[in-house]
Image (tube, helix red, strand yellow):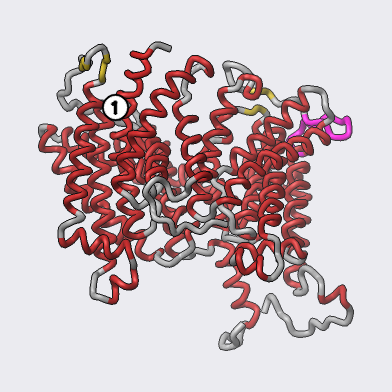
């Protein structure tokens, strides 16, 4: 119905190689893009800066983490640490007087270099042991960031981020910062969309499926693991910096603690391993769910007249967040992205449901 | 640094390490039977301590509350396996890890929701005054905890020689083979979860009496993971020895490092131990050698 394939004839190579051969996909993405660009004029500025902006930034982070887990099949329980390294490096470089565009690349590069330390563990072990060693590295990074005053900025451990200056123009308004986040998110999405069509992407998938087999067919799994870690760390570092400059405006060690790593992992799992649209869904779900839960619980409490303590109200959404992760793993292990593609697959052949896709 | 202080931190470290080993045994039990790394073990320790407090809050004396809590946690362990882990059998390990992390989040936040975040002590009636061993001062609570850890270890060694213990060993050895000779693998795995929950409760009581019961009990996870990996993830004796080793390294290391870096170096020592273990000897001191190297 919606995603009709009849009447699509490829008469040239560009047509067969298109990212979205089905018109419905193109129309949907086009309208979403149009909405995203027009959002500052359509959406209440409160919603823009407290929901859409963090959603876009976290989507970029989720895509970066998905690259390493979903595509390359390597665990990373220390992604928040990598983001933190990028953020701190960028903030320090900017405070030092380096132009913002250069310092953000510097931040990403620093994150990539230190991310390679995580990769060292991946070259020795895999599976569970890799997960545990990246978790331990996260603790080391946490500790280093918060205990070295030269990084965290002294006893208060809060470092104010300088104003974001793009090509010399200071960007102070929420709208401007929204566009910066949107541009980065689109860039990462575009990279990930094209990744699966490149030799790099296929090599990563080969390494994910079985690294011995990949080695047998001539894929240097050692090299591609390093590349995967470096690339995803670069994305994570830049995203961390953008998170600080566009959303938090000050950087503290707690913003990149273990819990944040687990949250990012939850976004990938809830969204779906190796799914790009799933990363959008997962980030939105994990990010927005606690707030929505909170207002839902408060509304229920007011409606049915039962009093809840402040502490209960504060922790209940968190407990439900844990329950939801568990439920997702039990009911749809491939996440929201899989649910979306199930619906899409159904509509592709509708009304001929007996046609196996 | 003078020798007495060094010895003192080493001995106290070893005792604390035995208490870490008590937490780590839970991880080892579960990993041994089902190859599931339980990252929620810290939260289970915390939950056990809270349940003891909940029973004590009903007016029961603490020595009644503890056995009741142990029985409750036994069924909590079985329930976790039955409802959460069983359906994930055969899934990729990232799903299983995420499941235990989700469990960790749920248990921690759930306990906070029900019982609040303020730290509450468990009073076991252990004397506060230190124990003198020659010139060395020893924390009495640690000594008691270490003693109980050793007793638990001995119990497990005996248990694994009984009929049920043999069944569990068979399951940990080969899933499919155990199945084909008529052993109920599900029941064995559930039993190991239940036993891990019971050990967690005991550890929770001991740690709760040392540092009070609150969310920070769940942070024991890093230490017990380190102990479990260092000992070899499927070796109970290894966990005991690794506990002593980690305790000594941590005690002595932090005694030397703390003045240099301004305190709180324990976590750093733990994390460094974990990373070093995995890089140098991933199967730990006594673990099985069938780990895939890349």
**Residue placed most toward the observer, B230 or A9:** B230
In percent of the image, x 44 and y 65: which residue is there?
A331
Q: Nearer the viewer, residue A26 or A298?
A: A26
| Quadrant position of residue B160 | bottom left
Q: Residue at x 40, y 39 (%)?
A: A315
User: Within the magenta stretch, is there residue A16?
Assistant: no
Q: Magenta span has A168?
A: yes
Q: Is residue B116 left or right of residue A183?
A: left
Q: Chain of mark 1?
A: B
In magenta, the rendered stretch is: A164-175
Residue A7 location (% of width, % of height): 79, 84
Along the line of sight, which residue is nearer the eye, B185 or B226?
B226
- Residue at point 62%, 82% (across, down): A357
Residue A283 appears at what percent x and percent y? Answer: 59, 50
* Quarter the N terminus of chain A occupies: bottom right
Q: Is residue A131 above or below residue A144?
A: below
Q: Which residue lies under the disc numbered 1?
A: B212
Badge 1, how many Cα within 10 Å: few under 14, some, many 20+?
many
SS state under label 1: loop
């Amino acid at each position: 119905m919606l995603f009709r394939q009849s009447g699509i004839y490829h008469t040239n190579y560009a047509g067969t190689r298109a990212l979205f051969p089905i018109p419905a996909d193109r129309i949907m993405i086009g309208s979403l893009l149009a909405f995203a660009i027009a959002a500052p004029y359509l959406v209440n500025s409160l919603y823009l800066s407290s929901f859409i902006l963090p959603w876009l930034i976290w989507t970029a982070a989720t895509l970066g983490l998905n690259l390493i887990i979903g595509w390359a099949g390597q665990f990373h329980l220390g992604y928040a640490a990598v983001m933190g390294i990028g953020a701190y490096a960028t903030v320090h470089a900017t405070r030092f007087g380096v132009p913002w565009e250069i310092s953000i690349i510097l931040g990403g590069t620093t994150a990539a270099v230190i991310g390679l330390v995580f990769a060292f563990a991946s070259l020795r072990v895999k599976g569970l042991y890799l997960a545990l060693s990246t978790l331990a590295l996260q603790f080391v990074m946490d500790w280093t960031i918060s205990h070295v005053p030269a990084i965290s900025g002294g006893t208060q451990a809060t470092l104010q981020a300088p104003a974001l200056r793009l090509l010399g123009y200071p960007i102070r308004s929420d709208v401007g910062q929204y566009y910066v986040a949107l541009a980065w998110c689109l860039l990462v999405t575009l990279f990930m969309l094209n990744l699966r069509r490149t030799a790099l992407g296929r090599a990563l998938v080969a390494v994910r499926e079985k690294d011995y087999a990949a080695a047998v067919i001539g894929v240097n799994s050692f090299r591609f693991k390093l590349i995967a870690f470096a690339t995803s760390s670069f994305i994570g570092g830049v995203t961390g910096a953008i998170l600080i400059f566009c959303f938090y405006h000050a950087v503290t060690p707690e913003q990149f603690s273990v819990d944040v790593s687990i949250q990012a992992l939850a976004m990938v799992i809830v969204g779906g391993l190796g799914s790009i649209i799933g990363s959008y869904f997962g980030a939105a779900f994990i990010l927005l769910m606690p707030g929505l839960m909170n207002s839902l619980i408060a509304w229920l409490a007011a409606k049915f007249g039962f009093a809840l303590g402040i502490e209960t109200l504060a922790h209940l959404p968190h407990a439900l967040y844990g329950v939801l992760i568990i439920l997702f793993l039990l009911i749809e292990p491939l996440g929201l992205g899989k649910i979306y593609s199930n619906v899409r697959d159904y509509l592709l052949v509708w009304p001929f449901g007996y046609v196996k896709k | 640094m003078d020798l007495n202080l060094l010895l003192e931190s080493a001995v106290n470290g070893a005792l604390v390490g035995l208490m870490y080993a008590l937490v780590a045994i839970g991880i080892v039990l579960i990993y041994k039977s089902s190859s599931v790394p339980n990252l929620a073990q810290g939260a289970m320790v915390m939950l056990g301590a809270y349940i003891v407090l909940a029973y004590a809050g009903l007016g029961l004396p603490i020595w009644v509350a503890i056995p009741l809590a142990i029985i409750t946690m036994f069924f909590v362990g079985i329930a976790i396996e039955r409802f959460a882990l069983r359906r994930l059998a055969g899934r990729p390990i990232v799903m299983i890890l995420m499941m235990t992390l989700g469990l960790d989040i749920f248990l921690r936040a759930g306990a906070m929701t029900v019982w609040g975040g303020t730290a509450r002590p468990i009073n076991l009636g252990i004397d506060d005054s230190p124990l003198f061993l020659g010139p060395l001062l020893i924390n009495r609570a640690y000594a008691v905890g270490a003693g109980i850890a050793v007793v638990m270890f001995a119990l497990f060694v005996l248990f694994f020689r009984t009929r049920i213990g043999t069944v569990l060993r068979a399951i940990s050895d080969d899933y499919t083979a155990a199945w084909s000779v008529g052993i109920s693998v599900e029941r064995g795995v559930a039993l190991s979860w239940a036993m891990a929950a019971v050990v967690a409760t005991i550890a929770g009581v001991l740690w709760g009496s040392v540092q009070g019961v609150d969310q920070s009990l769940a942070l024991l996870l890093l230490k017990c993971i380190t102990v479990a990996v260092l000992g070899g993830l499927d070796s109970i004796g290894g966990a005991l020895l690794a506990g002593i080793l980690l305790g000594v390294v941590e005690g002595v290391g932090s005694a030397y490092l703390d003045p240099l870096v301004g305190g709180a170096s324990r976590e750093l020592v733990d994390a460094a131990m974990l990373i070093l273990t995995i890089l140098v000897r991933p199967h730990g001191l006594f673990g099985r050698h069938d780990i895939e190297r890349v």
